[in-house]
Image (spheres, helix red, strand yellow):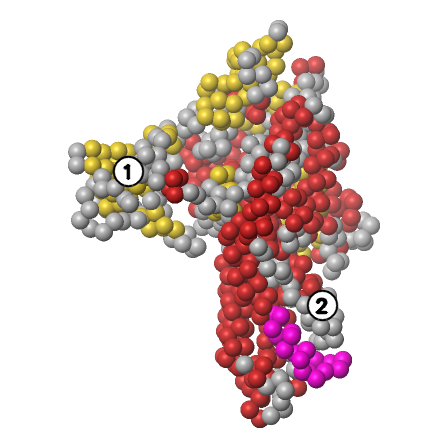
Amino acid sequence: MEASSDRVAIFMAWPYANGPLHLGHVAGNCLPADIQYKYERARGRKVLMCSGSDEHGTPITLTAEQDGVTPQEVVDQFHDINSKSLANLGCSWVNNVDPRGIEYGGALYNRTSDPMHKNIVREVFQDLLDAGYLEQTTMQQYCSVSDGEVRFLPDRYVEGTCPICSADGARGDQCDDCGGTYEAHQLQNPVSKLDPSALVEIRDTDHMFFRLDLFQDQLSERYDSQSKIWKPNVRAMTKNWLDMGLRPRAVTRDIDWGISLPLDGEEWSSKRVYVWFEAVQGYYTCARIWAERYAIGAGHPNGTDAWEDWWKVDTDGNIPKHIYFMGKDNIPFHTIIWPSIIMGMNSAATGSPPSIELRPGDLALESNVPANEYLMLQGGQFSKSRRHGVWLPSFLERYDPDTLRYYLSINMPEGHDSDFRWDEYVDRVNNELIGTYANFVHRVLTLAHRLPHDLANPLEKYYDQSLHANEISLVNQHLQSATESLERHRFKESLRTIMSIAQLGNSILQDSAPWNHIKSPESPEAKSSMSSLAYCWLLCRGLAINLRPFIPFQSDRLWKLLGCTEDIDTVNWLDSFNSDTFSWNKDAPSPLFERLDLESILEHEKSLADSKDNESSPVEGNSGDGLIDFEDFVKVEMRTGKILSVSDHPNADKLFVVEIQDGPDSTRTVCAGLKGHYTAPQLEGLDVVFVANLRPRKLRGVLSDGMLLAAEDDDGNVRVLTPESGMPPGSLIR
């Protein structure tokens, strides 16, 4: 049974409220969710979008302890900062009720500290316990011992060496480098983050565990059906978890900040619900809270049960579509853990065994999990904890939000990591957003206003649709292509296609040269040219609709400049270019955007980076221009080599283990992420280029001594770089 398309729930992974959002958050989940929400609404569908601030767990308590404040003060501060930043970015969280009416849905950016959220999580906990999906287990966990005080060290309170890939700085339950998870006591070389001098030892502690292992078969079956829909990164990470075998996972922790347990006994009073188990339920609790707070007052016929329209299979067997947006580090929580909890909830409610086959009244499983890769800052990963980032509040104080939305959309890390670079940001805004789109719009409006006019559009009388059959057909093809891309959550592909319509408009203007006929528009030789200008006016109208999911502020502004009086929210996406109605605004047009100056931007960012305040507060951002000195470049030693053999990496689905001949009588081993792009036989025997002086590093347990160089285009196609034939292995690249 497939999900229906008329009821769509958009879910965005909940960012921790322990600091301001950085641009990695925006590109990874915030912006994709909002683009999809705006698009689904433009298709006339009933849409509910849910997310909010993740306010429990060790990221919050660590920040509070480091800043000398309470956890509540931390979450209150950053929930306010982040919710305002998202509103200023143009995200649709402010529309709690859809302008079309409550039956069409709305949005809610909530908080996991919400009392109703806490109560529902306790209910789910109890239901799963009663149904036999939770069990008590004694586990081993690191704790610090200092001055006679014993303190358990859940996840982020301890750092050490990853037991999977051997990377340093791994957290107590998960490694950011390899994405692997492990039991709390498996971390190697553990050190307390709060007191590095404290003795760290392993002690027993009792916790409740979720029987994830009971869902192995159902999730494997789900993987088989969803793998043709999921992105390669989603397939790979999910398969890796399934192949390792699912094990019971702790759902409680030794911590005093979070949701208390619905359990009697003193031994449970100091424990709280584990944040991973709680936060994913936020999608469900948020929908119920939305119905409680907004549906009744807005007159929804189902009242507080309005959430069921977007969560439950209806009596005809129709399943609402569920789309989850996140960064790749959250994939297993949305393809393994959350579906297991949902199946457990369905099983607890009906008394039936867990199943991926849904029946009327069941809660829906995910339809797609279009997880993004990472947006990197000049090659380094954005990170709150390391205070490495460009922070959204600071960015929006200086720059037009639509310029950021455009740049991150056209540079979105959908299939591979991408970089945020100030020089590229300026280049794309000035040359594409302004040079291609905004200049086209401004030329059309300015030329139209040069014609004699009163209160009506002077172009209407010149428009002859029959003269533009080829252009109309091409635009419809572009619209169809952009629509198909958005249905598959391929945002940068869709945006490029829409921008090609603006490029087409510029070509029409150049070919028809209407400025030559402005003074004599009625002459016979002016007929075709003036009709082309009129058609370009209609293209501007359509572009305002199609670009609105990406650049909403300037789309709404263009809509007003065109004099359109109907609500843009009521215009169906597929009808963007079908109108032949010429609206009019008598006011003189003005440019949509101002050009950016790279030098002044870099000067400002450098001042932030050099400021002492920036060292203690992540609210201000910093970044360089992405340029390096010649002295830095010459440090990189690149040489030629020949691939001798290729084998599968034992612990990573995306990696090959490659043996390279790097000199006349020497070889080295390199791990290369080329699976899916090459087979082993295709690589063996190739002459290649590699970085020879890269510090050796273990990747998922295999020591990689160097790095193969490859090129990747915007469509994700990868090709290994090969030198001209005849260069022996070990030759230095100059």
The numbered disc on residue 418 is: none
Q: Position of residue 145 (x, y in %)?
A: 58, 10
Task: Give the mark, 2 or 1, whose residue is nearer the N terminus.
Answer: 2
Q: Is the C terminus in the top left, top right, bottom left or bottom right quadrant?
A: top left
The residue under label 1 is: 658
In this view, 298 is above or below 695: below
The structure residue drawn at horizontal position 57% and vertical position 21%, both measured from the top left corner, is 193
Q: Position of residue 269 (x, y in %)?
A: 70, 18
Q: Amino acid at mark 1?
A: Val
Residue nearer the viewer, 288 or 650: 650
In this view, 43 is above or below 472: above
Question: How dense is the environment of label 1, judged by Cα within 10 Å: few (below 14), some, or many (20 and up)?
Answer: many
Q: Which residues are magenta?
A: 441-458
674 lies left or right of 402: left
Q: Residue furthest bottom?
A: 524
The structure residue drawn at horizontal position 41% and vertical position 26%, both measured from the top left corner, is 166
The residue under label 2 is: 560
Q: Nearer the viewer, mark 2 or mark 1?
A: 2
Residue nearer the viewer, 289 or 638: 638
The question of residue 619 being in magenta is answered with: no
In this view, 43 is above or below 195: below
Q: Position of residue 468 (x, y in %)?
A: 54, 81
Q: Quadrant of residue 132?
A: top right
Q: Amino acid at mark 2?
A: Lys
Q: Residue furthest right?
A: 297
Q: CA distance from mark 2 to mark 1?
A: 59 Å
The structure residue drawn at horizontal position 28% and vertical position 34%, both measured from the top left corner, is 669
